[in-house]
Image (cartoon, grey):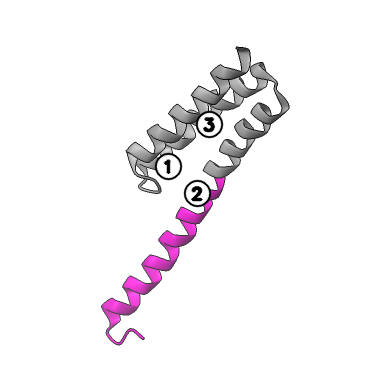
């Protein structure tokens, strides 16, 4: 357990930051799930719209430090690839 005042404050800050990051991660995953559901249903227009909404959300998560920027780019790339194969 934290003994010093500064360590106690650091613990509080970490807890608050963790809550914020959990919310951001959850929001990001919701957007990804919407894209995946549209892909599973085979609806290309819905999938494209969902991808268009998910892309900035993933980049925002990377900017805020929830994800590494390469991870966000990889996720966007793979989702876009799956959406593009729907039309073929």
Q: In this view, does 16 lie to the left or right of 83?
A: left
- Residue at the spot 44% in from the left edge and 61% down from the top edge: 18
Within 10 Å of the Cα at label 2, are there few (<14), some (14-19), or many (20+) other Cα atoms? some
Q: In this view, does 86 lie to the left or right of 8?
A: right
The image quarter in which residue 17 lies: bottom left
Mark before the other along the chain sequence, 3 or 2: 2
From the image, tell me which residue sits under label 3: 54
> Which quarter of the rendering shows the C terminus?
top right
Mark before the other along the chain sequence, 3 or 1: 3
Q: Do the residues labelled 1 and 2 touch (CB within 8 Å)?
A: yes
- Residue at the spot 44% in from the left edge and 63% down from the top edge: 16
Where residue 13 sits: x, y (%)?
37, 66
- Residue at the spot 57% in from the left edge and 22% down from the top edge: 83
Where residue 55 sits: x, y (%)?
48, 29
Provide the secondary structure element on which disc 2 rests.
Answer: helix
From the image, tell me which residue sits under label 1: 61
**Closest to the observer: 24 or 48?**
48
Measured Cα–Cα span from mark 3 to mark 1: 11 Å
Q: Is residue 51 left or right of residue 76?
A: right
* Residue lying furthest front: 88
Q: Give the range drawn in magenta.
A: 1-27
**Closest to the observer: 41 or 7?**
41
Mark before the other along the chain sequence, 1 or 2: 2
């Amino acid at each position: 357990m934290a003994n010093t005042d500064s360590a106690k404050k650091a613990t509080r800050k970490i807890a608050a930051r963790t809550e914020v990051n959990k919310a951001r991660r959850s929001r990001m995953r919701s957007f990804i799930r919407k894209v995946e559901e549209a892909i599973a249903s085979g609806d290309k227009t819905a999938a494209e719209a969902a991808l268009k909404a998910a892309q900035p959300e993933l980049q925002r998560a990377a900017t805020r430090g929830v994800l590494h920027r390469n991870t966000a780019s990889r996720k966007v790339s793979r989702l876009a690839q799956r959406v593009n194969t729907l039309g073929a």
